[in-house]
Amino acid sequence: MSTLLDVQGLTVTLPTNSGPMTIVDNVGYAVEQGQVFGVAGESGSGKTISVLALMQLLPAGAHTSGTARYGGQDLLKLRPRALREVRGAELAMVFQDPLTSLHPMLSIGKQLTEHVRSHEGASRSAASKRAFELLEEVRIPDPERALRGFPHQFSGGMRQRIAIAIALAARPKLLIADEPTTALDVTVQAGILRLLDRLRRENGLSVILITHDLGVMSSIADEVAIFYAGRIVESGPTRDLLTSPRHPYTRALLDALPHPEAAGGTELVAIPGSPPTPRARPVGCAFHPRCPYASEQSRAEVPPLVAVSETRLLACHVDPFGPK
Amino acid sequence: MSVPAVPIKVRSWQRRGPLASTAWRHPLAIAGLVIAGAWIFIAIFAPWLAPHDPLAQSATSFVPPSWGHFFGTDELGRDVFSRVLYGARLSIPLALLLVTLALLIGGTLGAIAGYYGGIVDGFVMRSADLVFAFPAIILAMVVTAALGPTVRNAVLALVIVSWPSYARVVRGLVLSVGQAEYVQSARLLGKSARRTLVRDILPNVFGPVLVLATLDLGNAVLLLSGLSFLGLGAQPPQPEWGAGVAEGTQYFQYWWIGTFPGLAIFTVVLAFNFLGDSLRDALDPQSSWSQGGDAE
Amino acid sequence: MTRDLGEFIPATAELAVLSIIVAVLVGMTLGVIAAIKRNRLTDHVLRVVSLGGVSMPTFWLALVSLYIFFFKLNWLPGTGRLDAVVSPPPHHTGLYTVDAVISGQWSTAWNALQHLVLPALVLAAFNVGLLTRYTRSAVLEVISNDYVRSARAKGMPERTVIVRHVLRAALPSVVTVIGLAFANVMTGAVLVENIFSWPGIGQYAYHSATTLDLPAIMGVSLFVAVVYIVINFLVDVLYGVIDPRIRIS
């Protein structure tokens, strides 16, 4: 399997009243073809900003450094014309809330076809036909009527399927899904995840899946990277990482998950403290104030993300759960 | 847990104090203040500033702008410059009077309507709707024509036309502020209605109404001069600006007669609009031309 | 009196329609530009321009523009709807430009158009200022919405994003202002028609008010009220066309 996207040293700062604020700090990972790459972390950990940076969709004044190699080009350095060609046709994005990320006044058909016509120069009828097929593929009932409809006429789950269809219309190789199920009912979530999985298997689509829900991660992600305070603290194959986490933060996250078979009355374990805001990141390892294993080194130096096995990367000076 | 200190760059003009930095960021407000201030000064001191008597002949007719007569002379040989300066003594106080009256009458009616609701509210609002139904200028024309074309009647007509806007705004504000809990608790505690209105509601109403009034000052000057232009306001030989422009239309080829009075109107209204616009930004950061915030 | 109205209404209508079209096109364009270049020099300049537009006394602008473009430069004709030597086209709608075109009287049409330009532009000045301001706010309100980001994420060219996605979403707010603009045109018409000797409703209103011709005053007021109602109705219909969420199924 070849590497589709190779991100190295990605750092993003946003302008604020008191100077630039580092949101994403020296992040690196690789996404293989046909792989679902999960990005997990709490709100404010920088996961969304890091993927927005890939498509240069950051707010004005943001500063990005590092590289993101895709198809022989650095996505972060693309000029507007090349960038337009990449957006939608190579990389595509699905956002968290389909109600706000779909245009309320344009028909579904329009939103499905406009970029296809723009990228591929397709005729109106050809694009319409493709739109119809896409709606079928994402299992929207009565696609003919749906094409003439508007977002507000559909339920949340349907809207997200439509958003996925729109994202895939210009045949991208990499789909970035930012919390695609967070705004949806639990019952609908499973359907969306199954859809993504099927698309991946049938079309060889690669997916970067962002979520804070480890359960979602375990069900379809092949690889997972754990974000904390703008940095990746651990990454590796999903099953391996979730069954034997090595970073104290990952372990704490897993411990905090309510166990479905725990005895009644078992206390919920929470991680003491709260994640630092980007402005108030601690010196050294960002997690050390909340970490029971923190050492002097943790408080002083930022732990580098290093390979601790053939498949696992870890950023921790102490590595309390590693092999002795 | 140590927090890295983030150095804040202090700009040099910020050190001169908050006023300087505020001024720099709102050049329009300053320009408006300066121009309006200048005109008010002129309105007060025109008798000392004007080189000639605005009502008397001081040279031959139709003298073009020159050193002796900066704005030339009109068809009766009167100095246009002096007439323009004296015109400020009409337009500006009248506009202030007009707006103050409309504000007081409209504001009071609106406050009463909003506070008491019911029949009173209905009556006030229906009257307001009736006025709104007529285009301002037509109503104003009818009133002045009916009562006789004088400056006083023009002001009266325009007050009649303008009070509904204030009534509506104040009523809306009173209604929304009146819903606030602290006001309702004051009412429950039995404080007198008037006290509640004055003490609790009015301070909140003040800001938006001030913005409205400042912007309306410009409008008032435009309407007053418009009526005079049509011959329905100030009568000759008063040096009113609108009437001056009307003179200018009659003596077309002597461009200075109509241009300068009109320019005066333009600068005064512009100044009030600059002020009102900046005030609106200051009071409502969401409004259109306020300073942009940080990136989201 | 209805006959009088019938003669005067088309004259004002011709003026009003052209004026509104100009004001909407220019005002909206400037408003979009100001929004895109938010807080930069262009934006500040446009702010001053728009404030200038609403501050200008219409009658003064009329006078000055007539002086410059007619008297001095002679680029455009003076007062009236047609040159004195040109006779009006056969009556179909009462709009000289339209009637002349229908009858194939091209030179008459051209002449009528030339006479229309100056008064229509003068009448438009205020509304350009108004529309620039309101379009700017409307665009700024929608430009940071998620669906705009989605359009860019699809690789749509920025121009399409602005026109099809941003402007469309901002249109409902702007349409409200267009209703207001019509009201301003009617008020302004009284002054403009006066200076340009334009035989329209504005002049008619002026004469009936100054002579206290009660039936005529009532007639004009009724006409104005009807126009307001029609405009409001059209605006409501337009909302439904633009925003499918508002349509009654």
Image (cartoon, rainbow, N blue to C red):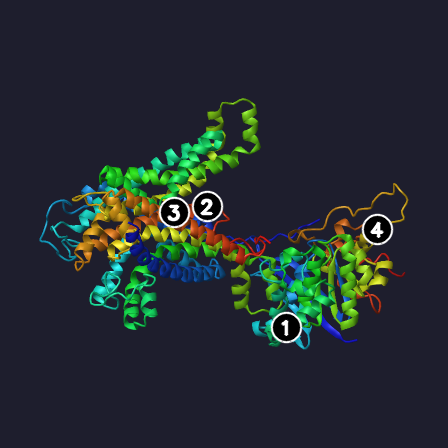
Element class at badge 2: helix
- Distance from disc 4 to disc 3, alpha carbons, whole Å, reads 71 Å
What amino acid is at disc 1?
Answer: Ala
Q: Nearer the viewer, mark 2 or mark 3?
A: 3
- Furthest-left residue in this view: B60
Closer to the camera, A139 or A35?
A139
Closer to the camera, A162 or A276?
A162
- Where A75 falls versus B50 (above or below)? below
Residue positioned 87% across, 59% down in the render: A243
- Distance from disc 2 to disc 3, alpha carbons, whole Å, reads 37 Å
Q: Which chain hosts label 1? A: A
**Residue identified by numbered label 1:** A127
| Label 1 CA crowd tier, 10 Å (few <14, some 14–19, many 20+) | many
Q: Is residue B113 left or right of residue A116?
A: left
What amino acid is at disc 2?
Answer: Ala
Q: Which chain hosts label 2? A: B
**Residue identified by numbered label 4:** A255
What amino acid is at disc 4?
Answer: Asp
**Residue identified by numbered label 2:** B282
- Distance from disc 4 to disc 2, alpha carbons, whole Å, reads 51 Å
**Residue identified by numbered label 3:** C225
Element class at badge 3: helix
Where residue B179 appears, as percent x and y from the top left, is 55, 34
Image quadrant assignment for residue A210 = bottom right
